[in-house]
Image (cartoon, grey):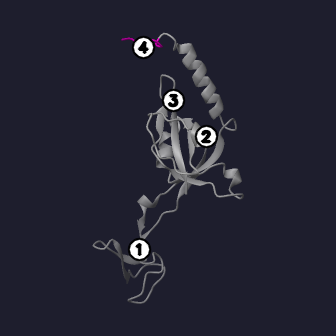
């Protein structure tokens, strides 16, 4: 059986739809500036002050003889605090995302029933931001309001591709941290 709507979706209709969504997603249109934060802890570096213990995967708490802060035998390394590794600082950048703040209007692209945590929001953006959204450890929505309240969120699910006949956009659910 053929799709009764296949003749209704023309390339012109797709173009109008894509232009409308692209207009909403432009910087300072319906979108907000967001600080997206990447946690670089995966790239930790070994402490330069103590000897790393490969068995416990922590510091052996023995001064290595060349580090910046010598410490007494039996003490805890003052640089890594006994962890053996130093966490690299997080990096961040500003991107623009559009949001749906009321969960009754969330777009559910896979027709799944999901439990939505209180205070959740859904973002909409172009699919070219997929890797940035997927690699984010947290996001601060509308970074101009950071002095007024706590707007930190973490992803509550994987980004879902969507579009009108193509996957040009992604929807992502975020929960408050």
Which mark is nearer the camera, 4 or 3? 4
Please say if 135 is above or below 29.
Answer: below
**Magenta stretch mostly in which secondary structure?**
loop
Lower sequence index among marks 4 and 2: 4
Neighbourhood count class around disc 3 (C-alpha, 10 Å): few under 14, some 14–19, many 20 upward: some
Residue hosting label 2? 100
Report how far apart the C-alphas of labels 4 and 2 lie in the structure: 31 Å
Neighbourhood count class around disc 4 (C-alpha, 10 Å): few under 14, some 14–19, many 20 upward: few
Lower sequence index among marks 4 and 3: 4
Numbered label attached to residue 83: 1
Which mark is nearer the camera, 1 or 3? 3
Task: Based on the picture, tell me whether residue 3 belongs to the magenta stretch.
Answer: yes
Q: What is the secondary structure assignment of the residue under circle 3?
A: loop
Q: Is residue 129 left or right of residue 64?
A: right
Please say if 177 is above or below 34.
Answer: below
Q: Quadrant of the C terminus?
A: bottom right
Measuring 47% from the left and 42% from the top, which residue is drawn there?
131
Which mark is nearer the camera, 1 or 4? 4
Lower sequence index among marks 1 and 4: 4
Which mark is nearer the camera, 3 or 2? 2
Report how far apart the C-alphas of labels 1 and 4 lie in the structure: 61 Å
Tell me if label 1 and label 4 are in contact, CB under 8 Å: no
Quarter of the rendering containing residue 54: bottom left
């Amino acid at each position: 059986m053929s799709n009764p709507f296949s003749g209704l979706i023309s390339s012109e209709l797709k173009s109008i739809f894509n232009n409308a969504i692209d207009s909403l997603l432009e910087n300072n249109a319906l979108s907000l500036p967001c600080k997206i934060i990447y946690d670089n802890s995966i790239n930790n570096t070994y402490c330069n002050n103590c000897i790393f213990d490969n068995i416990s995967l922590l510091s052996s708490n023995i001064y290595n003889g060349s580090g910046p802060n010598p410490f007494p035998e039996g003490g805890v390394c003052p640089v890594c605090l006994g962890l053996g590794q130093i966490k690299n600082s997080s990096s961040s950048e500003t991107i623009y995302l559009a949001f749906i703040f009321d969960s009754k209007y969330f777009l559910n692209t896979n027709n799944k029933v999901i439990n939505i945590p209180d205070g959740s929001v859904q973002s909409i953006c172009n699919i070219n931001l997929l890797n940035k959204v997927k690699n984010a450890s947290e996001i601060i929505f509308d970074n101009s309001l950071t002095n007024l309240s706590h707007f930190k969120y973490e992803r509550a699910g994987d980004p879902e591709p969507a579009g009108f006949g193509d996957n040009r956009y992604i929807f992502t659910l975020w929960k408050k941290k």
